Image: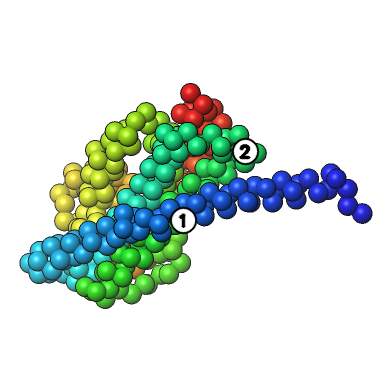
Amino acid sequence: MSTATDTMPASRARTDWIGFRTIVLREFSRIIRIWGQTLLPPGVTATLYFIIFGSLIGRRIGMMGGFDYMQYIAPGVIMMSVIQNSYGNVVSSFFGARFGKHIEEILVSPLPNELIVAGYVAGGIVRGLLVGCVVSAVALCFTHLSVSHIGLTAAAVLLTSTVFSLGGFINAVFAKNFDHISWFPTFILTPLTYLGGVFYSITLLPSWAQLVSHGNPILYMVNGFRYGFLGVSDVDVRLSFAIMGGFAVGLYAFAVWLMRKGVGVRE
């Protein structure tokens, strides 16, 4: 015989699920509604990368890592697009909610902080995956892509998208104005991405530059994803996934802690 006490956990779980799903569906509808700003530009940018770096410069470079240069850079270009768009989706969406004051509607709801963070991060993951699919389709127009390890490929893109969605969330929490949400992507994220082995193998670099490159976390993400496609990597793949998993757990815990403290949302 059920009692009121028995039904309370089920009712709370249902409420939490509805709240989480609402955030994710709102983020998804926003991405699709403005697809000309969210999905089209990455496809155009990737096309330019493949034309300039792949076709024009790639002919002079030849083979890299045992693969045609166009094929070698394809996973890196896909991952670069996933990183930038996962980050950009969450930082713009959550800061927009803060700026427009409608974040208060979520804060007064019974939805736990853990699910508020998870909802926005899931929206970033969705955009990262959609953009990844668009750029993959573009890549297939220029080169042949085969997946050597489908499980590792999926894990790499999901973990990386999660990490940078969380990064975008944290940036949005601390940002005071719109200039602050563009500072990190411009001066830190973009340089780290270009220096993360997207367009080259770090084995081509001098020893000191290789050592410096190993301090760039994006190098491990790009190479983990490349290994899933091509089966080659400049770094230990186990270390790559350990770093991605560690960043995901650490940043999620930090984001939840910020929400509990009310940093940026109750000031």
For the N terminus, give its image quadrant. bottom right
**Residue 62: x %, y % from top left:** 12, 69
Q: How many marks?
A: 2
- Say whether disc 1 or disc 2 marks the residue closer to the N-terminus: 1
| Residue 233 visible (yes or no) | no
Up-down: is 50 above or below 37? below
Q: Which residue is mark 2?
A: 109
Q: Which residue is mark 1?
A: 28
Instruction: Identify which residue is drawn at 58% across, 44% down.
Output: 115
Judging from the image, what secondary structure is the residue with disc 1 in? helix
As shown in the figure, which amino acid type bears the numbered disc 2? Ser
**Residue 152: x %, y % from top left:** 43, 64
**Residue 144: x %, y % from top left:** 26, 76
Q: Would residue 132 appear left or right of 28 to someone viewing this image?
A: left
Judging from the image, what secondary structure is the residue with disc 2 in? loop
Q: Residues within 10 Å of mark 2 (few under 14, many from 20)?
A: few
Q: Residues within 10 Å of mark 1 (few under 14, many from 20)?
A: some
Q: 102 or 121, which lies in front?
A: 102
